[in-house]
Amino acid sequence: MPPASPALPTVDTGLAWDHRFADLGPAFHTRLPPTPLPAPYPVAHSPEVARLLGLDPAWLATEDALQLFSGNALPAGGDTLASVYSGHQFGVWAGQLGDGRALLLGETAQGWEIQLKGAGRTPYSRMGDGRAVLRSSIREFLCSEAMHALGIPTTRALCLMGSPAPVLRESVETAAVLTRVAPSFIRFGHFEHFAARGQTTELRQLADYVIDRYYPACRTTPDFGGNAYAALLQAVAQRTAELIAQWQAVGFCHGVMNTDNMSILGLTIDYGPFQFLDAFAPGHICNHSDTQGRYAFDRQPGVAYWNLLCLGQALHPLAGEVDTIRAALQAYPRTFQDALARRLRAKLGLSSPHEGDEALVQALLTLLAQDGVDHPIFWRRLAHAVDSGDFSPVGALFSNRAAWAAWLLSYSERLALVDKALAAKLMLKTNPKYVLRNHVAEQAIRAAAQGDMAPLHTVQRLLAHPFDEHPGHDAWADFPPDWAAHLAISCSS
Ligand code: AMP
Ligand code: MG
């Protein structure tokens, strides 16, 4: 148990609260306050998320907000708790995990859960210190908002507070608390937890809660003879498939796709050693701790399916026969293939399918991989090339010019079938100019560690509109510098 903390002051946010997750009962969580954080200072906030919650963005700059969102005060009317879950980590059953450093502050009446990450130890901290470091918290803050701006389902980030308090990781770093927001932070691992313990009553309670709140259509669908739990599995498989297709299309590596890091709502959750691809390398491993490459970029679609199998197994006591579960899970490969094909086509400016598209896409991906072409720059230049008709800046990215020229010929034939202006427009809205690559995050982090938040705020603004040109900021959309090749991002955060 964490040490008892002195009574914390309360802050009135003006928010109306609701406590539906808390009302599930003590089998699901432990109530406890955050651990105070010394000398907090504001690092960043998202005005958009503030407005989403019904908070005045200006209020986030106040002393009250600073104290509340660093864990030094409690929200009036809130209900602070850590939830329990289990999960498979790197393919191995890890048993009980839980919110080891995350704390639910409460749930707004509009249905947003607000969570502090890095708010101190909980009964689920195991060997951890309950803290998060500034470096990783900046990465999560920037990336969750960047993903949202890319149209990719994700938890959101309200604000980030830092502290000079030292935190030991591979070296000594400083602490930070990230306030994140989502309709729910329930993971596959929440279901695995009760299934593994044979707690079928709680398992059913959790599934009913998730269905009633987030998947009400599962109650009325005729699929699976009206079995709402099988329908839930199918719906989660579909959402997960749509999510992973978006990751693959944009070149996002999550890095730690353990079942406890898989959202039941199909959101990107728990940003750790994630990376956006620089050079296109299908087998890229972004997590320094992932020695086997289990979570390599091109293994993500398969791993998501494996994780869904774990969820299916957990739902077995409710969803019935194995054949029913298998049928529900079939939604994953079907949805994924269609979604990925659709998204890759859109990157090429092709809004509807045509015979030969798949071969065209595959040939391109092979070329990109062979030449290790920079992924974001390639797609953005291609969009501009379709717009202007000048493909030479794209060709310059390839060393195998003959292969590129051959591919371009078949692409040009395909483009002749569509309205080029519309294609270019679609591409410029699909292929972002600004992407949170490791070197971009690193520059924001290094400046912030010196007390200079300006680069972080600039990057945040660019990533909020990643498809816009933002004249004068091209350097943030450039190739990674040489020093970035040595950045190693591990699980430790
Ligand atoms: P992750 O894979 O980083 O999402 O975390 C796996 C588990 O470890 C979760 O249950 C986290 O709550 C917990 N955890 C990670 N880092 C810490 C930490 N510094 N202190 C306490 N628990 C942690
Ligand atoms: Mg996690």
Image (cartoon, grey):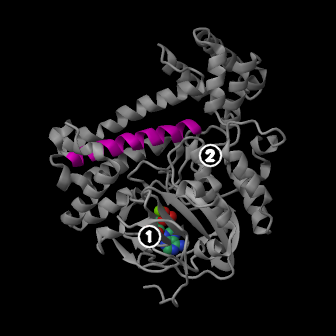
Position of residue 471 measured from the top left corner of the image (x, y, whole percent): 82, 38
Task: Answer with mark 1 or mark 2, whichever residue precedes in sequence.
Answer: 1
Give the number of the disc on residue 360: none
Quarter where residue 404 is shown: top right
Residue 245, relative to residue 264: is it above or below? above
Quarter where residue 475 is shown: top right
Q: Quadrant of the N terminus?
A: bottom left
Which secondary structure type mostly characterizes the magenta part of the structure?
helix
Q: CA distance from mark 1 to mark 2?
A: 26 Å
CB of residue at label 1: within 8 Å of ligand 1?
A: yes
Q: Quadrant of the C terminus?
A: bottom right
In this view, the residue in front, 165 or 470, is: 470
Residue carrying label 2: 276
Can the viewer see residue 479 in this picture? no
Please tell me whether residue 376 belongs to the stretch shown in magenta: no
Q: Which residues are magenta?
A: 228-250
CB of residue at label 2: within 8 Å of ligand 1?
A: no
Labelled pair 1, 2 in contact (Cβ < 8 Å): no
Residue 349, relative to residue 227: is it above or below? above
In this view, the residue in front, 353 or 148, is: 148
Q: Residue at x 21, y 67 (%)?
A: 199
Position of residue 77 measured from the top left corner of the image (x, y, whole percent): 45, 74
Position of residue 171 measured from the top left corner of the image (x, y, whole percent): 67, 73
Q: Residue at x 71, y 24 (%)?
A: 400
Please tell me whether residue 239 belongs to the stretch shown in magenta: yes
In this view, the residue in front, 390 or 185, is: 185
Decide if residue 428 is on the left or right side of residue 270.
right
Q: Residue at x 47, y 13 (%)?
A: 355
Residue carrying label 1: 99
Between marks 1 and 2 in the image, the one whose residue lies nearer the viewer:
1
Residue 276, relative to residue 421: is it above or below? below
Position of residue 13 measured from the top left corner of the image (x, y, whole percent): 55, 69
